[in-house]
Image: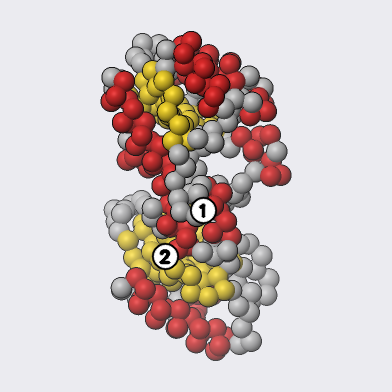
Amino acid sequence: MRVWRELSEVPTDLGRTAVTIGNFDGMHLGHQHVVRRAREVADTVGVDRVVAVTFAPHPMAVLRPEHAPAMLSTVEQRLPMMEAAGVDDVLVIPFSREIAAWTPDEFIDRILVGALHARAVVVGANFRFGNRAAGDCNLLRRAGLEHDFVLEEVTLDGGPQVWSSTYVRTCLAAGDVTGAAEALGRPFATRGVVARGDARGRELGYPTANVPVAPGAAAPADGVYAGWLTVADGPDAGVTHPAAISVGTNPTFDGDRERRVEAYVLDRTDLDLYDREVEVAFVERLRGMVRFASVEALLEAMADDVARTRSIVGA
């Protein structure tokens, strides 16, 4: 899969394409449906390549940073998921206020027609674009008549609640990792480099991989979860371990302020994961975060957390 990070990187000899557009944050089932439909439409109109157009950073982070959503994934994390869904090429537009000021017609002329030679455009039915979100599917359909491309509107997926990145964030904020997984088509996961912490877990007999929550990144509500830890680099890259996972600030011990994800790999005290990249996936919430009156009470709860994790993940 080719990835272009500037308009100038798009080959000038690029043939006609099927284009799909969106933030694709999390690549949930709704996004996957849109991409699959883009592949079907590409075959119908006789073009070989599906190009996904996305933005970095998220437009809200530029226009109204105080209201920018917590991100479910980075662009780099999305790329393999986009490829697996059927995308051939990705154009990552470096979003800026200048681009935000483009009219819908400018966006169509510069991106869809000028750079990507769209023969088909496939978007969700609620798609909006251009300055002040003035462009919609009706405008795209009219532009297609002028520029020789067809528009395909994809009905939004989901049950009573439409699957969306916003819905996934709402689930995570409530600690509902099961609901988030249903919309994503996989467990929600956070990724990062294991940092050295205060080693309290090791002292208590439960050494944890401490993964700080990156600024602006989404994470489940504070609490304890059953899930998995996968090593992302080194000779054992790809190896997955069952894990009991804590999200929060360790309220039993005074002084902790940094919110973090701490994963205890079941039955392993020998793993050295410091400075290595790992992915922590959340399967089921066990309980909320509690300030225990004593270390003994905490240890009793941790033993129960591990037993329940073992039952849930089948370890």
Between 306 and 285, the one lying in front of the other is: 285
Image disc number at residue 161 = 1
- x%, y% of residue 88? 33, 29
Three-letter code for the amino acid on which mark 2 is drawn? Val
The x, y position of residue 90, in whole percent, is 41, 29
Residue 277 as seen in the image, left or right of residue 128: left
> In the figure, 264 relative to 260: above or below?
below
Residue under the image location 61 percent in, 83 percent down: 292
Residue at the image point whose x is 68% and y is 71% from the top: 255
Question: Can you say whether 114 is above or below 130 in the image?
Answer: above
Provide residue 182's location: percent of width, then percent of height: 42, 57
Q: Identity of the amino acid at label 1?
A: Gln
Measuring from the top left, give residue 148's x and y in whole percent.
Answer: 42, 12
Name the foreground residue: 96 vs 295: 96
Instruction: Determine which quarter of the picture holds residue 96.
Output: top right
Identify residue for label 2. Answer: 283
Image quarter (top left, top right, bottom left or bottom right) of the N terminus? top left
